[in-house]
Every structure is written in C-alpha cells, then in structure tokens.
Amino acid sequence: MKSVIVHPERCVGCMQCMPACATAHSEAKDMFLATLEDPRPRPRVHVGAGPAGEGFPNRCRHCDPAPCALACLPGAILRDTETDTVLIDPDLCINCASCAMACPFGVIRYHDDRTAPPGKVVAVKCDNCLERLGQGLIPACVEACQSGALTYEESDQALKRQTDQVAASTVAAAGAARPAAPGFELMMAVKRATKETNRTRA
Amino acid sequence: MPKHLIIGNGIAGVSAAEAIRALDPEGGITFIAREELLPYSRPMISNVLAGSADFSQLPIRGPDFYQDLGAEVVTGQEAVTLDLEDRTVTTSSGAQKDFDTLLIASGADPRKLKAKGAGAKGVFYLRSADDVRGILRALPGTTHALVLGGGLVGFKAAYGLLSRGVPVTMLIASGYPLSLQVDAEAGAMIQAELVKHGLSVEVGVEVTALETDTAGRVSRAQLSDGGALDCQLVVVGKGVWPSLGFIDPDQITVDAGVLVDDHMMTSRQGVYAAGDVAEHFDLARGTRWVNAIWPVAVEMGRIAGMNMAGRKVAYRGGLSRNVIRIFDLDVLTAGLVNPPEGEGYQVMARRNERLGIYRKLVFKDDHLMGATLVGQVEQGGVLMNAVSGRMPISGDKERLLEPGFNYAYLQPETAQAA
Amino acid sequence: MSYKTDYADLSIVTDTQLMLEKAAGDQVETVWDRFQAQQPHCGFCEMGLSCRICIMGPCRIDPFGEGPQKGVCGADAEIMVARNLGRMIAAGAASHSDHGRDLVEVLAKVAQGKAPGYSIKEPEKLKAVAAEYGIDSEGKDDLAIAGELADAMFEDYGSRKKSIALISRAPQQRQELWDKLGITPRGIDRETSEMMHRTHMGVDNDWVSILLHGMRNALSDGWGGSMIATEVSDILFGIPQPATSTVNLGVLKDDQVNIIVHGHNPVVSETIVAATQSPEMLRLAEEAGAKGINLAGVCCTGNELMMRHGMPMAGNHLSTELTLVTGAVEMMIVDYQCIMPAISDAAACYHTKMISTSDKAKFPGMEHHEFHPENAQEKANDLVRLAVENFANRDQNKVYIPVEPQEVVCGMSIEAIIGALGGSAGPLIDAIKAGKIRGAVGIVGCNNPRIKQDHGHVELTNRLIANDILVVDTGCVSVAHARAGLKTAEALAKAGPGLQEVCGALGIPPVLHLGSCVDNVRILVLLSALANTLGCDISDLPVAGSAPEWYSEKAATIGCYFVASGVFTHLGPMPPVTGSMKIVELLTAGLEDVVGATFAVEPDPEKAAEIISAHIEKKREALGLDSRA
C-alpha cells in the first residue's frame, strides 16, 4: 500500500504543503476561495522548525497501535483498516485534548472545521487525503512538495531508496562524490553556525 | 480452554479482554461488572456534567460488545471474596465464578467525606455515571454549590457546575489549586480563570459539619474557620483509593494498590491486576506508584491481557499525566511536576503573558522528567513521549520552552526519514 | 530555577535584555517574537530559488535536483539567483539614492529661497563640491552656486551622461578598471531602472552579465546617490566635528518630554532639533510640568543628528520598539527606511504619539504630518507642541529607563579625521607603513534577529582593535560600538599597543564614528585619499569592509559597491545566493580576478576577525610592508 513518507532532510521549510493541505480540506478546493470560507480551512500538516530553523514537515504517521486512539476518551479515533488511516470522528470527539497528550509527534490541532458540526471545536489531523485518493489524486501535501520532502510511495520502496542513499553517502564520505545539494548544505551550515554563535557561552 | 475472569468492566478490564481475544480466540472471558452494563468512558462523566457531552456518548463500545467479543458478563455485582486455592470468585449475589487466570481491575473508589452529616441528601462524589445523574437531578433548587477539594475532580466538578450556571465555592484544605498536578504558578492561572467565570475559592478551610433541611437535604455547611455557607449541593473531590476491600492481604501482596510485576501479575501465579487498583512503577518518579489515570489503565490492561493469553510482554511503567480544559485555559501535565528539592533536578519555566502560555520543565541530567503546559498544549504529547521514552535531550534544553517548540526540536542534527 | 526567557541569547545589550523582559510583562510583541513565528524560513526564498517576477510563475527550483530545475520561462538556478540578487541591489540603490535626491531637492529649494527652515551651513564645502561638478563659483553667491549644483546633481540621476560626476574621486586605476569591465555608472536612476529591465523575463539571461550590472548599479549608489546624500547633508547641515554624546536607552529622561526621531533622512529631524530648542517650546514644556525637551535618535536619523549636533542616541534597529517600551516617549517622528510597520503596535501600549512625515512612507497607526522644504519649520514646531502636550498623558507607573547612558565620541567626518591627523592623511599612512596600525576596517550595516544583537559587531571589533586594526563604523553598528563603550578614550585599553599609541597621541578612540549608513561613502572617500596618496588602487590597501549583522537591501548594495570599489567585504548573514554554487563561487573567489576583492560569509565574529586580519596582513605583504601573514 502506498503511503506518504516524510524525508525531513529534504524539507526546505517553504510551507507550501500547508496551504495545499488546507485547500484540499476546503469546500471550494481552490486556495483563494478557500480563504473566504467560514470556518476557514486549516492545514493538517505543519511545518515546524528545528533548533537552527531547519524545516520539518510534521504529519500524522497513522501509527499502529495509535496512541491517540488508545487515549481517546469517547472512542472517536479509529483505524480505517482498508486505507490504514487513523481517523477522528468529529461527531464523537469531545475536544478533551487527551490525544494531544498522547500524540508523540504533536500533529493534532483543535479548531472548528467544515467536517464537524457547525461551531464545534474538534480534534483535527491528517486523513491521508482520502477524499482526493478517491478521485484518483495523490495527497495534497505531496503534490505541493517540490523538494522531495514528502513522497507518496510503497513504504518498502522508500526503505530501499533510503538504504541506497545511505550507501551512496558512505561512498561520498570516502571522498568519491559531492553532497547532493551543496548550496542547501552551505546554507544550513551557516544557519547552524549562526545558532551556535548566538548561544551565550558561560 | 482457559477461563479468563475479569473483575471490572472499566477500561483496564476491557483493554485486557480485547488483548486476550486477539491472541486467544477460544478462551472463555467473563466480566464481573459493578456499574453499567456497557463499558463507559469514566473521564467523560465530567463532560456530561458540564453539558458538553450526554450520557448516550459515554459507552466506549457498541451494544454488542460482549457478544462480539465472545464474553460473558454479570452485572450489578461486585467481587466479595477470592478463593485462590479453588480459583473461584464469589460475587455480592453469592454467585461463584471459577477461573484459570484472573484479572483484578476493580478500579478505585472516592475517598469519603469525614464530616458530620456527610451522608445527607445532596452530597455527591464525581466518580460514576450514576453520580452525575444524581447531581443533575439535584440541580433544580440549587442556588449555591460547594466543591470540596482543589484537585482535578474538584476542578472538573466546579467547571461543570459553573457551566450549568450554578454559583460554586471551592474549599481547599491546604496548598493551592491542583497542587498535586501543577506548580503554584499554573495553579494560580487556573484559579484565576475559574474565578473570572464566577468561582469562589477559599484555601485553608474545611467543612466540619453539614446541616440539612427538613427533607434531609444539605442546606448549610459549617466551616473550620468558624464560618458557614449556605449550599444545596456538595460535591466531594478528595481523591480516590484502590478498590481492594475483597482482597486478603495475606494472600496477595498489597501496598497502596495491588502490587504487580512487569507482566501485571500479582504475587500469585495466574492472578493479574491492572488499572486504578494496580501499583506498578512510575517512570518519572522512579518508584512504585499507583497511577490511577485512564491512559495508564489502557496500557496496563493491554499488557495484562497479552500475558494472560500466554504472551510474555513487559510493561516499562506508567507516567502521571493529565489534560484539562477550563473555559479558555488548557492545562497539560506529564510526569514529575514538583520535584523534590536537593535531588539534582533542574527546573526551567517560562511564562509568556502575551501568548497566555506557561511552560515548566523538569530535567534530571539529560532526561526530561516532567512537563507542565498552560495554553498551547498541542505539543504536550511530544514532551510526554520524551519523558516516558527517556529520550536524551542533548544540548540546549531551554529550546523546549520556546513557543515554536515542536517535534523537530528533538531530532538529532542529521534528521533521517521518519 | 530559571523563570525567564534567556534574553542573553538574543542580545548582548543590557538595556535590550531588560526591556525585553518589560515587553513580555507589558505583552508587547517584538521583532524577536515575529522572527520566531516565521521559523522555518522558506528555503527556496533563502537560497534565491524562488521567482515571482512574472505570472507564468511563481516558480521555484528544487535544490536537491529532483523537482523542477527551471522556472516556467526556463530560468535555471543561476539566472534565478542572479535576477533576485540584481533586484535586491536595485532596491537598495533606489533607497539610498532617493534619499539623496530628497536632499538635492532641499538644496534646490534653498537656492530658490523657498525653504525657510534651511540654509547653506558650509559654503566652502558647497564650492568644493561644485568645483567637482565643474561649476565655476567665481563671482557667484552661495544660493546661485547651490542652484547650479542642485541642477548638476539632478543630472547625475538622469541618463544623459557617460558617467556620474563623483567617480572622479576614485583612484585612476579603479576608474579605468570600471571602464574596462563596462561597469562605470552612467546615471543613478538609470542603472536601477536598467536593472529592473534586465531582470524582466526575457531580457538579460546571462547571470554574469546580470551580476556585472549589479555592480554598476551599486556603484551608481555608492559614488552617486549616497555620496550626494552625504555631501549635500554636510553642505546644508554642517560638516560633522568631533564631539561627545551619550547612547543607549538611558538617554531618555524620566522628567522631560522625550521625542525620538527615527529613520534616515536628516531633512525632517534637523528642523525638529531647532524646534526643540526654541524658547517658546521650552516654556510650554515647563508649563506642562516637564524639566525640558529631550530629543534623541534611533537608527540613522539618530546618527545624522549625533554626527552634527552630538544628539544622544537611544538605540539601533532592533532597539526601536524597545525604545517605546520604556513608556517614556511622548512622540516618535519617523521619516523613512527601516521603520518596522509593527512599531505602532508597541506604541499603542503606551501614550506615545507616532508621526509619519514623508509622502512616500506612511504607516498603520501613525498620524501623518507631511513635511516639505516649504513648510518644514512650521510643521516641526507643530509636532514639538503636540509632543509637549502629550507629556500629560504619560503614565509614570509604566516608565522604566533601565540603564545609565554611555558616553561616546562621535562626529568623525573625513574632514574631522584629517583635522585630527593634523591636516593630512600622512600620519595615518605613516602609522600603517610602520605597522603600528595594521590596517583599517569599516564595519557597517544593521541588526538582524538572526544574529544576537550587537554580538557580531562588538566581538569582531574587540578582536580587530586588539590586533592593531583601526575600525570605522556607520549606521546601526555605530550604536553597537558606542553602547559597548568602544568609542571612548578608555576603549584604548582594549586596543593593541600600536593602535593604542597612535590613537592615544591623536586623542581619538580606536573606533571612529563616520555617520549613518548613507555615510558609508565617507569610507570610499577616505580609501580613495589613502590610495591616491600611496599611488595604488583601493584593492591594494590593507583594509576591509564588514557587515556582521546586515539585513537590508541597502546593505546588499553597500556590500556590492564596497567590493566593486576593491574592498574585501565580510558578511555575517548569508545573502540569498546559495541556490547557485556558481554564484557563491564568483562572489567569494571569482571576483578577485575581476575587481580585486571578494565577499566572505562568516556568522561567527571570532572567525570573521581571523579572516579579516589574514586579509589585511596579506595586503600588507603585497605592498612590501611588514606582515604577520
């Protein structure tokens, strides 16, 4: 089964996945029109920043077993086994934030949403873009990502690719090849050095 | 074909039964249920009290739960005696149930109010769905309610009653609000939020006696400071105590709760315990502890069930944690909140008045031991997991206090695909 | 237990740290909060790999090579980065040069007698500059010369000349090199306008060609618009002379009406200075219960006033909001550039009145009082009166002035430095030749929340002066150095023995305040004078430039005109060029063979000091001087 794979080392922090996700979960499916909706659609993927400002696309991993589902008081979080997706039922959700306490990735947000009864604040998170998958589209965050930080592929394939990369980087470390994106490495190196420079030394 | 007997149909018992069934399709499973027929979400009763959920939402499993699971249930009965030689349990109706493996998941009972008139009508606890039914029935005619105790239950009761439009006075015997869950600063923020919405709080005062009207209903409370307060409703929130009255401590080792090993087994072979009644290990405190909270009951129940079905699975330990939403204030705590002095704990806290958030973190060496978050609690699970997973926090610990803190902050410098 | 945000990681400045704490308590959002909220920054934009120039796009290029490698038009990483950098330079040049134009307009109005608040303060400089423009002053009165000079300077902005006038100040070799490279600036507006044209889709798609024009565009500012701004400011408002003043938030007075001027152009603030000193205003202040009217500056408007009037300065770029958090400011009057639009939000938490003055710079939450040369005097009086009236609204309970002011020696124009040297650059050259002074570095630029405030400046300077390298500063750096006490006689103790001896004998501190950021041209003039005396090019001198905490487009342009003029230039923050390693390579190495100078990027000031010192020693060696290389 294909799933969204996150490659944080590839994230440039552009946040384009966020409006794409919000739009995918809007009524209009159009970014501009979506901004006019009430409630305004919000993203389920969140680009956080690492200590030196590294981008990090944070998205539900649809864990199995899912800690959020185990912690959910009203039993509103269930796994859809067919798509291997952990889903929150907005009608059952009581906005108690027990899942906030459980999610090891911090990907759940609490707000009103067009999928919930009007005016009700509920827990909201990634639904693997089931609506889009049903239309033969890939998840919106992956479609928006231009740097390869989010891919949609068979997970064993992703694993193999990663293994290949590790192997390649070992060769590179032996002096054979330059890193894949020297400009990006350079920028990140400057950022980390800046962070280190700013740190007050005792 | 083994017979599994489970005392209690709360979340620990249910989680255990489901874990057993996943591994053992054939074995017999029997529940002894004291309260409702269908297992329900105990923490949610305060939402029902507040009106944000109703009774129909309480059950955590469907009406065909027992049938689907292939389990039997005896309801309205509790365990009275255990015969560990014959391997039988006698219930309050005199029925005898035999077992090969037994799970004690009898939960906990509220600590009783020890004051004159404590048995009056209009005096309630907030522990069961029935308690909430009683409180709701008593609301008409209530112009002022007393909540005894400044713990979580007290706050949930006060919040629920205020949400129903009832003026509430909370009496806290000592310390400050939520002193077991949060530090003084967060406690003050929580109190301020409740006071803003009409709560009166008095610290250092206890009820000495309750007076009743002619119908036997509470009408007035005499206080330890010599004063008195009119009230038609009293909710007692003085904490809970493991329900282990039916256990002979000479046969099964008992401390505060029933002691269990890493496989949730008690001192007796084949007898397990899980949930609010069980005493295992607290990861942050590093000591035996009864963590009488829902998520730990889920974890313990699953572990107990797997072991009862013959798969040796160990539990690493539980962690205190709680999240409450009080009007516009969210409070989340995990692990050690108020560490003892002089034992090498490092405490960092930061309050951001503009964003209305407060964060306090407790470290020991390179490990996060506890966290308190007021406002912006979405990343609480990340911190909780760092505590329970004993994830080493290298370098700058202060960054965990920053408003932008997120999962990426815990990543090693060369992030790998996740 | 630590209960506070570690403000020491945000700024080395005590008053900033204390005011950040007050801001947190007063629930005032600051630039650091907003910086945090922007994390992570967009990597495409940070690398120069996003393009919004046309609406076939917007486009971006995947730095990892798998996603798109060309924009819709076909621009690759080199073209995209070069176009973006080119437009950045154009915007910086436009800003400083337009500031210069505003001064020329005042000069023209003065000549016409239509600017009652202004006059010619420096007739000798007027004549000297007029002569450089080929204007014969013989038998003409000052106003007539001023009129002709204004016209000639307006010509420099146009497109009818082969080259702008003041490049004649550069060494002959340098001018010839520019000609050879085809980067001699022809007109100030022309080069900016041409840059916008070249970077339109489908015009200049040779990245080297775009960047060469970027240097020409920058030179049109450095030897054109900015230089005009400085020279005309000197003519109208006086050539700065050494003076002492004070700096940091301690310059605010809890018992006086505090007025802060913010921005860059002295045209408005000069009239405010006069108004605050008028007996009528002082009487009004007294009636309002204030002990006087205290005028202080922030940013470069502050520098302009400090240079010419010894007016105190409250802070630099990142301190602007915090100045208001003191709760002691009755009025902030802004002109333009580097005024954060959020500053009125900070003011709204206190009684501070916010005033905008320029038709080209309006802000949310500010009252607009438009200044023109014709009405400036009258407007200035109106504003000071409003400020005095606002004193009654101050809530003394909210006032917190956290520190005592720091003394500073200011006003080191080139004329003043030459004066201090005894009338010629000779003693400075001798000291450099003798190795007592190893070289000189111009540290310029801004603050940037990426870098701990002032750390980049002060740490670098401490290390340079300890290595007997003379430091001159402008802009927001000048406040950093002043706050750190580096522009006092006592600071000589931090200098190496040679620098200590020379500066001690001349009675100057080891760090010299040259003015605002537009005054970076004073450095060009000084370097030209040194090179001409030595008979070499600027690129041969043991000197360097540095912008350790730069943030603005203007700074990008300054960096480019420094390098194009032959000055090796260090940058703290990385410019948005890493999307193209070819361009990184050109800027940090390749340019050496083109203009005899390069950029170096190093956020750590300790390492930057080593890089700069090594460069200076290398240049000394090439000149045949003793070298520690």
Image (cartoon, coloured by chain):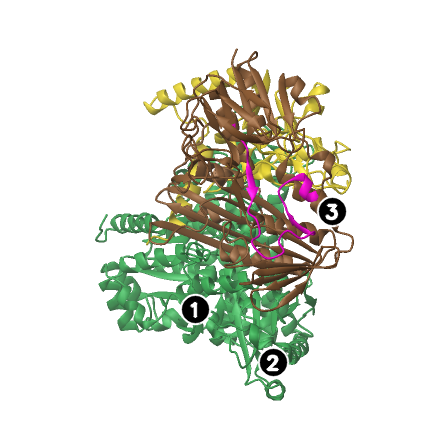
Taking the image as drawn, is residue C439 in sight? yes
Instruction: From the image, state the color of chain C.
Output: green
Disc 2 target residue? C275
Q: Count of labels shown?
A: 3
Q: Is residue C251 above or below residue C543?
A: below
Name the amino acid, label 3. Leu
Q: Residue B136 has which mark?
A: 3
Chain letter for the part of the structure drawn in yellow: A
Q: Is residue C497 above or below residue A9?
A: below
Tell me where residue A61 sits by quadrant. top right
Name the amino acid, label 1. Ser
Q: State the image coordinates of residue A106 (x, y, percent, origin top left).
A: 55, 37
> From the viewer's perspective, is the residue at label 3 or at label 2 nearer?
3
Which region of the structure is painted magenta? B104-132
Disc 1 target residue? C413
Q: Chain of mark 3?
A: B
Q: Residue at x 53, y 55 (%)?
A: B186
User: SS of the residue at dot 2?
Assistant: helix
Q: Chain of mark 2?
A: C
Is B131 magenta? The answer is yes
Q: Earlier in the sequence, mark 2 or mark 1?
A: 2
